[in-house]
Image (spheres, rainbow, N blue to C red):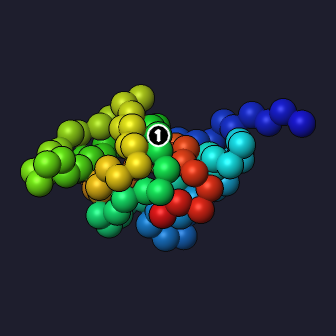
Amino acid sequence: MPRIVTDARQFTADRAWGARDLAEIEGASVRLHWTDQPYRWHVNNGAEVFLVLDGQVDMHWRKDGQEHVQRLGPSDMFLADVGDEHVARPLGEARILVIEKKGSV
């Protein structure tokens, strides 16, 4: 049955990085996250699509031993491949759509 999500920009969770599961597509999870706190440095075991829906997020990643950072706003995306070490640090509240391999951390 089709669904329409109209409250993505108002979504909140009871903890930082709390999520609403939206869909599972051939082994990938599609989740809406709310946060007001940084995540942690991590490497996913699959590709990840990170789309900021509301707020601003400083995305940090490491490449060749050097740290890089890019500020993301609404409609900006970060695409991580397997082995890309990264961490998201919101500036205040943010809502993010994440598509990644189910069970990825």
Q: Which residue is mark 1?
A: 49
Q: Given the current orientation, which residue lies at the most extreme right position?
A: 1
Q: Quadrant of residue 68?
A: top left
Q: Quadrant of residue 89?
A: bottom left
Q: Say what amino acid the circle numbered 1 marks.
A: Val
Relative placement, left or right, of 44 versus 72 is right
Q: Is residue 15 above or below residue 91?
A: below
* Residue at x 74% of width, y 34% of height: 4
For the N terminus, the quadrant is: top right
Of 81 and 22, the residue lying toward us: 81
* Residue at x 32% of width, y 50% of height: 84
Of 83 and 52, the residue lying toward us: 83
Q: Is residue 22 above or below residue 37?
A: above
The answer, for residue 15, to whether it is visible in the render is yes
Residue 40 image offset from top left, x and y in percent: 32, 66
Residue 94 image offset from top left, x and y in percent: 40, 49
Callout count: 1
Residue 3 image offset from top left, x and y in percent: 79, 36
* Residue at x 43% of width, y 56% of height: 44
Residue 55 image offset from top left, x and y in percent: 36, 43
SS type, badge 1? strand
Q: Given the current orientation, which residue lies at the most extreme bottom position?
A: 15
Neighbourhood count class around disc 1 (C-alpha, 10 Å): few under 14, some 14–19, many 20 upward: some
The answer, for residue 37, to whether it is visible in the render is no
Q: Given the current orientation, which residue lies at the most extreme left position?
A: 66
Relative placement, left or right, of 1 versus 71 is right
Relative placement, left or right, of 102 versus 51 is right
